[in-house]
Image (spheres, rainbow, N blue to C red):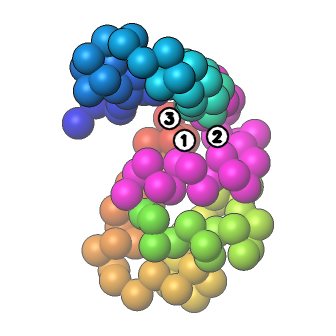
Amino acid sequence: KPLETPLHSCAKMRRVWGGWACPVAAIVLVLSCAAGFREATALATGHPKTWSVDDVCEWAKEAGFRDVVQRLRKHEVRGGVLLSLDERDLENDLAMKSGIERKRFLLKVEELRK
């Protein structure tokens, strides 16, 4: 599934609202799209090694690992640490019990290293 950017979401919202018929909705939509675009741009342009804790958590959510976000935040996992995680770290420190889930997570991290 291709990554959905905030601009795609804006296009969806325009269809839902039937165009820019409501000025208040249009202003809210433009502001929320701009904020979302800034967040997506930070993840898209920065090398994962330089990511903040918030960037790592956002990546985890987008990659489908919402259940581990709180633990990433608790351990203050930044980009450099994310790239160095191994299966033991995932099991012991991030409490990922499923071996399959750990493998999926590590495959996603491997994609970031490329």
Tell me whether circle 1 and circle 2 mark residues in contact (CB < 8 Å): yes
Residue 15 image position (x, y, % from top left): 25, 20
The amino acid type found where label 1 is placed reads: Arg
The quadrant where residue 71 appears: bottom right
Q: Which mark is residue 114?
A: 3
Q: Is residue 42 magenta?
A: yes
* Front: mark 1 or 2: 2
Q: In the rendered view, would you say 28 is above or below 104?
A: above
Q: Give left or right: position of 33 versus 100.
A: right
Q: Is residue 11 visible?
A: no
Closer to the chain start, of discs 1 and 2, is 2
Q: In the rendered view, would you say 67 is above or below 35?
A: below
Q: Secondary structure at mark 2?
A: helix
Q: Which mark is residue 80?
A: none
Q: Residues within 10 Å of mark 2 (few under 14, many from 20)?
A: many
Residue under pointer 1: 113
Residue 73 image position (x, y, % from top left): 69, 68
Residue under pointer 2: 48
Q: Magenta stretch: dominant SS? A: helix
Tell me whether circle 1 and circle 3 mark residues in contact (CB < 8 Å): yes
Specify the segment rendered in magenta: 41-64
Q: Quadrant where the N terminus lies? A: top left
